[in-house]
Amino acid sequence: MQRSTLDLWVGLFVMGGIGALLVLAMKVGNMSGGGGGETYALTANFDNIGGLKPRAPVKSAGVVVGRVTGISFDNDKFNARVTLNIEKTYTFPKDTSASILTSGLLGEQYIGLEGGGDTVNLGTGDKIKQTQSAVVLEKLIGQFLYSKAAEGGDKK
Amino acid sequence: MATHQGFSIRAVGARTIDSVLRLGYATRFIARTIMSSGTSLKRPRLVIRELYFTGVLSLIIILVSGLFVGMVLGYQGYYTLQTYGSESALGVLVALSLVRELGPVMAALLFASRAGSAMTAEIGLMKATEQLSAMEMMAVDPIARVVAPRFWAGFISMPLLAAMFSAMGVFGGYLVGVVQIGVDEGSFWSQMQSAVDFQKDIMNGVIKSVVFGFAVTWISLFEGYDAPPTAEGVSGATTRTVVTSSLAILALDFLLTAFMFGGV
């Protein structure tokens, strides 16, 4: 085997190995880009986002129309501000409501959008006013127990 | 009867002493190999040549096996996860099982049978045809000239091969999970990214593959160097390399996993 071909192959091998390590490392960091197409940003404030994560899907009628791009804490309102990137091809009226839903019993959480009847559509940077928080199981059980206890008290 | 009993006890004793002697010899062998690595540093071309044989020529089997293991993980993982409605966790399952366990272990097993056995056969045959003795006659240290470059080549290529195996496996899992079955792409990657930790998962996998690389090359080289200089001896040594390496990889993997992830 020629010396230069040998060097070339070994060089490719080492580069490939380091490249594979980098690819693995990138999986931990943020994947840049992903899914082409133009998008516009919307924000929505939720009292409680539960286990919502960045890059979670935004669905309307079950169709994925965008992704969650950012989650931050709103210091003025003491709730969570979620930024959504919606694909340009989908438009929603001004009075659209957003709710945090769960796919399946233990599945991942996503944002569901439900269109209203307004004639004006949401544009870049607009805010979705009607929101519904994630269902927190502990609170739900607490409410259930409380109402049960109240019922028991009435019967006596 | 008494003589027979004495014989079997003697056999046990002889075997014990033999294996202790062999272990000591193997340790002195690896110590001598590392001590006489100066030649490899002065002439890196020797190592590069061996890197070609141990690393580049193992690429095909590593990449293809990685792809298939990843694809099978995609199918099986999806089948189990969809029962709980959490198929979006498929990415986490594929990535964690590959990076933590399957990548280093499978790559090391393939490496032992592909490159380790070749190293044993080569050195064993060199010994059987008295090439090693000839080198000694010419005042060339066969350990520095033949063994050490192979050791370093195996030591370097093993982590690279394991990383490639894992990356290829994740790609295979992506192909089956996202492209074929249709798991949501965003949650596949995002859940993977939030669950896989660079320090805890990826670096521990790399450490594992380094340890396996050390063990496999050590065993292969020692078996070759220690092989009886006959056709039978070389074939037996090659078999022993694969068997001992595989057992060593699995046992070491258990120990390393217990240390790295046992407390979690």
Image (tube, rainbow, N blue to C red):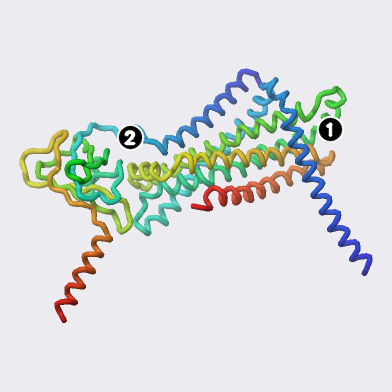
The vertical placement of B113 against B14, above or below, is above
Q: Quadrant of the N terminus of chain A?
A: top right
- Chain ID at mark 2: A
Check disc 1 and report the residue beneath it.
Answer: B129
Left of B191 or right of it: where is A130?
A: left
Task: Residue type at mark 2: give it.
Answer: Gly
Closer to the eye: label 2 or 1? 2
Whole-percent x, y for residue B25 in the image: 80, 41
Instruction: Write down the quadrant of residue A148 in the picture.
Output: bottom left
Which residue is at the far bottom?
A156
Q: Are marks 2 and 1 on the same chain?
A: no
Q: Residues within 10 Å of mark 1 (few under 14, many from 20)?
A: few
Check disc 2 and report the residue beneath it.
Answer: A34
Task: Residue type at mark 1: give it.
Answer: Thr
The residue lying at 37 percent from left, 48 percent from top is: B181
- Chain ID at mark 1: B
The vertical placement of B156 against B102, above or below, is above
Left of B182 or right of it: where is A75?
A: left
Whole-percent x, y for residue B62 in the image: 56, 38
Secondary structure category for the residue under label 2:
loop
